[in-house]
Image (spheres, rainbow, N blue to C red):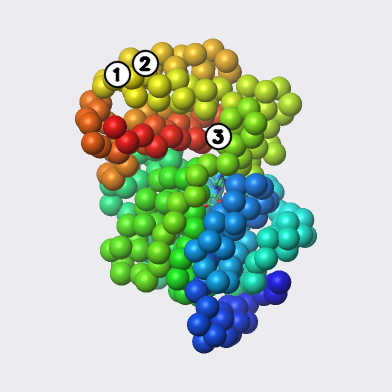
Amino acid sequence: MKVYRTIEEIRFEIGKLKSAGKKVGFVPTMGALHEGHISLIRKAHEHSDAVVVSIFVNPEQFGPNEDYETYPRELDEDLEKIKEQGVSLVFTPDRTELYDSEKYLKIVINSLNDHMCGASRPGFFEGVLLVVNKLFNIVQPDVALFGQKDIQQFQIISRMVEEFNQNVEMVMVPISRANDGLALSSRNAYLSEQERKIAPGLYRSLTYIEKQVRGGVDTPALMISHQKSELEAKGFKIDYLNMFSLKTLQPVETLAKGEQYILAGAVWLGKTRLIDNILIEL
Ligand code: AMP
């Protein structure tokens, strides 16, 4: 496994893979790797001949009061973990390798970031698109793998690929969970022992709502508001919890057969923000 910090080196190595006719699979991450990231790498092997992983904590997707400085950085452990997964190349650029001090351009997102995490994290998805766009241009992957855990991110990147005619196949990988249902996340490391115990409550609420919806409830607003109150009583602070259209990422009041929805929530437990979702096709 080769590890490179510069664009020039990684481009050169990927050029060699491509001229050998290899299909390149790409897994972008911010490090502090867990089983969820590893599941993306495993899936990448099914879709490609050579897997490239990037590890970069992207400053452009953190708001001024967010956790860029304290985000967990565990490069040595990360490299150990992915060495076992048969990864060909790892790209770990410094901040200055990807970003110049001056920027004259930015990406603007229409409507897809009005709700869900886009509403509570202004500029977040623009920052994600900026770095993914750059990484796609550097790595030139044939296929890129992202987690369902960040489903709004997946949908927005997929639109970028489509609207900007990028030649990348997008693959979504299901959410990896702990035994008690909590979605794995690098940020789970922030949870206290007590918070960790109640954290699976978010997934439990989502599965409860899912069951009712699959059972025929087509106007879930009241039930959702009831679940919000239950979560608040347990100590969660609700950012959002709702049904959204998979395509438009807008909230939906009345559900219809044949449509695809995301049942998604974001909550705070103390200083930790947790997100989770379930895809529902009726
Ligand atoms: P991050 O390092 O948090 O930016 O995540 C890198 C990639 O891993 C993204 O595509 C995430 O959606 C994905 N990911 C994070 N957590 C999980 C999880 N629990 N299950 C599946 N994929 C995940």
Q: Earlier in the sequence, mark 3 or mark 1?
A: 1
Q: Residue at x 41, y 59 (%)?
A: 170
Q: Earlier in the sequence, mark 2 or mark 1?
A: 1
Establish if 229 lies above or below 93.
above
Disc 2 from disc 1: Cα separation: 9 Å
Q: Residues within 10 Å of mark 3 (few under 14, many from 20)?
A: many
Q: Which mark is residue 223?
A: 2
User: As rendered, which of 175 and 75 lies closer to the eye?
Assistant: 175
Establish if 21 lies above or below 91.
below
Q: Position of residue 72 (x, y in %)?
A: 69, 49
From the viewer's perspective, tell me whether residue 45 is left or right of residue 126: right
Q: Which residue is mark 3?
A: 274
Q: Which mark is residue 237?
A: none
Residue 171 can be seen, yes or no: yes
Disc 3 from disc 1: Cα separation: 26 Å
Amino acid type at circle 2 is Met
2 and 1 marks in contact (CB < 8 Å)? yes
Residue 237 can be seen, yes or no: no
Q: Residue at x 46, y 25 (%)?
A: 207
From the viewer's perspective, tell me whether residue 63 is left or right of residue 166: right
Q: Residues within 10 Å of mark 1 (few under 14, many from 20)?
A: some
Classify residue 233 by image quadrant: top right
